[in-house]
Image: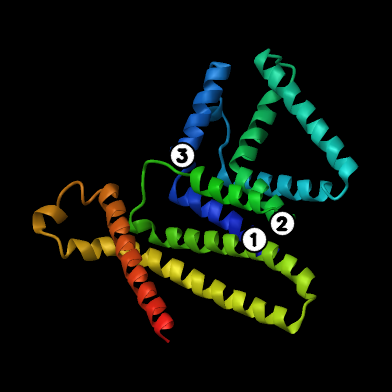
Amino acid sequence: MQGIATFSLMFSLGLAYVINPIDDSLFFKALDGIISGIYGKEVLDELNNSAVAGMLVGLFAGTLFVFLSMNKKVYNYSILFLFTFSSLVFLADIMNYDSFPYQVTQQLFLWFWIGLPIFVGIIGIWQDYIGNQIVAAFLVLVMPLGLSGNTNEQIYPILGFVFSFMLYIELSYGHTRYSRLARVMHYSREYETVLQWFLVTLVITLALTTGLTSIAFLFHDFLSGLLPYSFRNSIEFNTIYGQALSVMVFFMIWAVVQTLFSRGYLARQVED
């Protein structure tokens, strides 16, 4: 479960950068502005901002962190060394100490920031830290976010992202929750029933999420056939903003239908 959650996290981050290129990311544009203000020159533009390299560095750093944390003394010394080394590199950059190969470390730091969700997520998955799992999920959603938007032409990468992202959330949290439950139930028959229920719920959740996302994006084309000619051929409707509004309208309708169904179901349960 932990291994599948780790690969799902990496796959979702990779697809997020396929959907939203890293050069258009608002996060990295802000980071580039901050670093350029500190050093007085364009630093990130001179470096390799490969998302694949960043994910591999994040995977390596997260795995190394998990292994080091098994020994508290080694972990403390490693953190102290890393903090001291990072401070020396930063000071050498500020003081223009050219004898220090700081361009290599800048490249590594950039790749580390790209792979930061992987680093944080691996710690949360393998050490059962729910806070790290939430932070990693938040970073996967926020870091690649840009202003270019998405259209129906990217429906397959979007569905792949939704599927892998939901699989990471369900499996990472599920392992944390059910591993604690296993210590209480001692792997009894009831525990096997709970695991079967979890797997069935997981399959239904993934199917519903992927299906609703695909329908929401296709709802824009369906809606264009119902609207007046002047509206469906307007500039506003045929841009990313029109697509986003169509998705919002679909999920609003879905929420209303779901609420009505839930109220009706609860009313019948009370009457019975």
Numbered circle sitting on residue 172? 1
Tell me where residue 110 appears, x and y as whole percent: 61, 35
Residue type pointed to by label 1:
Ser
Residue 191 in the image: above or below residue 133: below
Nearer to us in this view, 256 or 111: 256
- Secondary structure at badge 2 equals loop
- Secondary structure at badge 3 equals loop
How many angstroms separate mark 3 from mark 1 (CA)? 26 Å
What residue is shown at x 65% (from left), y 54% (from top)? 130
What residue is shown at x 36% (from left), y 70% (from top)? 258
Residue 89 in the image: above or below residue 174: above
Q: Quadrant of residue 167?
A: bottom right
Residue type pointed to by label 3:
Ser
The residue pinned by badge 3 equals: 25
For marks 3 and 2, the one nearer the N-term is 3
The residue pinned by badge 2 equals: 128
Instruction: Count neighbours of disc 3 (C-alpha within 10 A) and say few if under 14, some if 14 to 19, many if 20 or more.
Output: some
Tell me where residue 25 appears, x and y as whole percent: 46, 39
